[in-house]
Image (tube, rainbow, N blue to C red):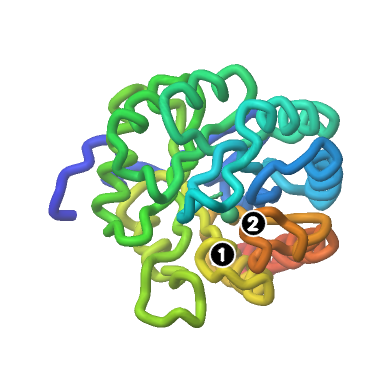
Amino acid sequence: MPMPCRLASRGNEPDTVVRAASARFGDGAFALIGGPCSIESEEQIRRIAAAVGQAGAAMLRGGAWKTRTSPYDFQGLGDAAVDLIAAAAAETALPVVVEALCEAHVARLARSVAMIQIGARNMQNVELLRCAGRSGLPVLLKRGPSATLDELLLAAEYLLLEGCRGVVLCERGIRGFDPSTRNVLDLGGALRLKELTHLPVIVDPSHATGRRSLIEPLVLAAAAAGLDGAIVEVHPHPDAALSDAAQAIDCPTFARIARGAARVLATLTYELSA
Ligand code: PEP
Ligand code: MN
């Protein structure tokens, strides 16, 4: 690695297990996070929480403040959404992850969620990283669409230097030349990251591809590759989602993916122990 990461680099470290309430990343299991791109209503988030919890998800996701490319698109319900997802999670005992866009959001979330997400567009917002690192919560750090692996690891280093409780890295697609998929899921890069760092690495096939038909095979591929988990956008009526509808999957599909990932993992474990 050209740039030194004193805390994030693999060195001789075994895999670090990151805990977010009852969720575990990097313990050899495959942790699935499911939930809507945007929290839209009490009914929507309660239905999704019940469905992903029943499917065996490790965590519930949901966007409260959205980083939409266009200012004319739905921007999220804001603070009210945090209350809605916290209430839905309390009913299902699922830990929650929500993205923070600024320091005020970190302070708001520190009271209500189990993990803070730093989004792709903010991967190098160093003041936000420092603030999230000091929050007392673990952080889900997404790779910027044009960031190298070294840049992602140095962003993680900002968090760890502040004493961050734990960092989970997320490959969410990098910018390619072909608009056939929204981004390019860099599975090789995610595997290379596991060599470079002891931190857990998960994938986000939703934002990587922008297409719901590709979510299931890519989650299974990530599980088969030995990555630590996946984060997936789920909606009870995917076509009606207020943001990222084309990549949202429905609740039964999420449950099938969870069963499939468990089968892949059981096969791998059998092969390793045979
Ligand atoms: C999200 O997860 O809701 C999101 C906006 O993702 P990204 O930061 O990867 O674009
Ligand atoms: Mn989204």
Pick whichever, 256 or 75, lies toward us. 75
**Helix, strand or loop at disc 2?**
strand
The residue located at (35%, 63%) in the rendering is 192
In this rendering, would 57 be left or right of 141?
right
Quadrant in the rendering for residue 96:
top right
State the residue position of label 1. 205
**Element under disc 1:** helix
Q: Amino acid at mark 1?
A: Pro
Q: Residue at x 64, y 22 (%)?
A: 112
CA separation, marks 1 and 2?
Answer: 7 Å
Instruction: Check contact, mark 1 vs mark 2: CB within 8 A.
Output: yes
Quarter of the image where the C terminus is located: bottom right
User: Which residue type carries mark 2?
Assistant: Val
Q: Which residue is rendered at x = 30% and y = 47% of the image? A: 153
Quadrant location, the N terminus: bottom left
**Is 71 situated above or below 42?**
below
Task: Look at the image and tell me whether residue 274 can be seen.
Answer: no
Q: Residues within 10 Å of mark 1 (few under 14, many from 20)?
A: many
Q: How many marks?
A: 2
The residue that label 2 is drawn on is 232
Q: Looking at the picture, does residue 71 appear above or below residue 171?
A: above
Q: Where does residue 11 sit, x and y in percent of width and height? A: 27, 45
In screen coordinates, is 7 left or right of 61?
A: left
Picture coordinates of residue 175, whole percent (x, y): 37, 68
